[in-house]
């Protein structure tokens, strides 16, 4: 009887130990699975681009380990000429950039898939979209990013650059 009880106790301990190892391994996988999001945190914050055409503003916040939320506005004079909301999401190994532009595409988001990635560059593409088909974000330095949208319009490549400067906030 004692042998049976000892065997059961050892079995329970081994089973519990395996479960703890699985949990630790799952946590390690979950933590490392959002490494692209972690490396893209340079995008977070408030950004502006003042040009002759108007003022472009982007704002990015971290919702959680797998999603950033953004807002973008283009202001001409005192009028908001365009606005959009964006999300940057990672599901498994796939990262997407998802803009929803007010009064376009039936107010539905358009998904752009990450096709190029370095610690200072994000390239998203959707060849089926009318314009743009490509969206690029480059970190120039901690206080400067260079965004660019591009694609084919009437058989010609059109590129629109957005050099942004970080807006410093008093924290």
Image (cartoon, grey):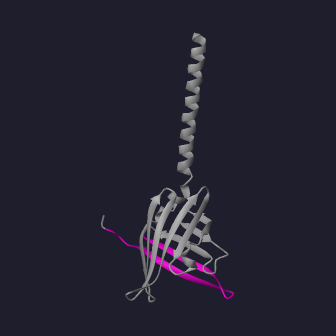
Identify which residue, 139 or 150, lies in the foreground: 150
The answer to whether any part of residue 75 appears in the image is yes
> Measuring 58% from the left and 38% from the top, which residue is drawn there?
22
Q: Residue 47 vs residue 20: left or right?
A: left
What segment is highlighted magenta in the picture? 143-169
Residue 4: x %, y % from top left:
60, 14
Please tell me whether residue 124 is drawn above or below residue 35 in the rendered image: below
In terms of image quadrants, where is residue 79?
A: bottom left
Residue lying furthest left: 170
Q: Residue 171 vs residue 32: left or right?
A: left
> Measuring 45% from the left and 60% from the top, which residue is drawn there?
63
Residue 69: x %, y % from top left:
47, 66
Q: Main secondary structure of the magenta part?
A: strand
Please tell me whether residue 130 is drawn above or below residue 10 in the rendered image: below
In terms of image quadrants, where is residue 152?
A: bottom right
Residue 60: x %, y % from top left:
45, 68
Residue 101: x %, y % from top left:
52, 77
- Magenta segment includes 151: yes
Residue lying furthest top: 1
């Amino acid at each position: 009887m004692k042998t049976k009880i000892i065997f059961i106790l050892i079995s329970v301990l081994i089973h519990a130990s395996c479960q703890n190892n699985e949990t630790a391994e799952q946590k390690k996988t979950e933590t490392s699975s959002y490494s692209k999001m972690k490396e893209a945190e340079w995008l977070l914050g408030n950004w502006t681009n003042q040009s002759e055409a108007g003022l472009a503003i982007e704002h990015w916040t971290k919702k959680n380990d797998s999603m950033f939320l953004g807002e973008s506005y283009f202001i001409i004079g005192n009028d908001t000429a365009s606005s959009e909301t964006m999300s940057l999401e990672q599901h498994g190994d796939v990262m997407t950039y998802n803009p929803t532009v007010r009064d376009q595409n039936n107010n539905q988001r358009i998904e752009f898939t990450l096709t190029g990635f370095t610690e200072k560059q994000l390239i998203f593409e959707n060849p089926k979209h009318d314009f743009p088909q490509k969206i690029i974000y480059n970190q120039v330095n901690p206080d400067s990013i260079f965004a660019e949208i591009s694609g084919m319009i009437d058989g010609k490549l059109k590129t629109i650059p957005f050099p942004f400067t970080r807006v410093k906030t008093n924290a």
